[in-house]
Image: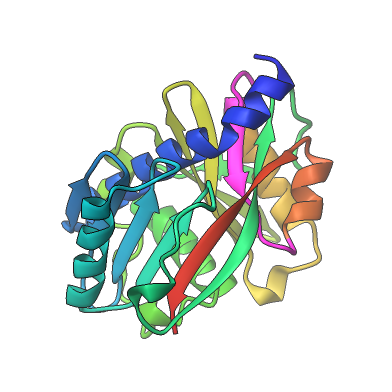
Amino acid sequence: MSIETGLAGAPLRQARNSAAFWAATGRSRGHEVIRRRGFLAVAGDERAGLRVLIQEPGLTDGELAEITELAARATGPVDAEDPFSLTDLNHLGDMRSWRMPVMLRPPAPVTEPSMEVVRVHGEADLRAAERAVIAGFELTRFEPYRAGEMFPTALLGQPGVEVFIARLDGEVAGACVTVVENGFGSHYWVGTPDAFRSRGVGRAVMLGSLAPLAGLPVTLTASRLGRPLYESLGFTVAAESTWWASR
């Protein structure tokens, strides 16, 4: 895989991987997963809401109309993402929108993390990961906390899905989820609670979770604050992804 070819194809790879991740999340939560040519949607409850993932650079009028109907029927918040930045969903309601870079890391070795990073296998570590992500991303929709609501136990059994935690001074200080789909990896929910920030936790959890993916190209969508870390780990910006969220 040349880096040029990889960068050009990164939005489509990110779209497919995000669809695999959210379909796995939806299945594990018992929510409806809707697959169409141009999008995948997960229709959740009043806290999880509706998630829409654009899968192609252009949607048909019928697909756009179906997304509009799903948003109108949603019982909770609405979130959507388009890694191609070619579909306009501002009509869905009172939505805010922003752009974040889709990034690609070619296959390459990684160094050892500065703290313990482990793959989650048991219930206790999964709950700790869940709490770390909710706190790190300030996901108020999942408060008050309900164990297993964001990361159900069934998520660990979904194909290609792995959850990782980093421990600092004996406490779970960060977490992330990785997904492998069709020969590509991707990262989600790379989160560090406030109390552990600026202590190298984000870098450690990335290094620990990248190690099993060192032989694969890996994509992710980066926040403004996360981008410098990912660039230092070998990720390159490939495209801009547009995101929407209900206010």
Residue shown at the point (66%, 35%) measured from the top left? 104
Residue shown at the point (60%, 32%) measured from the top left? 218
Asked if the stretch drawn in magenta spans residue 214, the answer is: yes
Residue shown at the point (63%, 34%) measured from the top left? 210
Q: Quadrant of the C terminus?
A: bottom left
Span shown in magenta? 212-225
Q: Nearer the viewer, residue 170 or 141?
A: 141
The x and y percentages for residue 222 are: 65, 54
Name the side, left or right, on which 65 lies relative to 171.
left
| Above-or-below relation of 66 to 142 | above
Residue shown at the point (17%, 75%) measured from the top left? 73
The x and y percentages for residue 204 are: 72, 47
| Above-or-below relation of 125 to 141 | above
Asked if the stretch drawn in magenta spans residue 156, the answer is: no
Q: Is residue 114 visible?
A: no
Q: Quadrant of the N terminus?
A: top right
The x and y percentages for residue 43 are: 21, 63
Image quadrant assignment for residue 5: top right
Q: Nearer the viewer, residue 34 or 20?
A: 34
The x and y percentages for residue 146 are: 30, 75
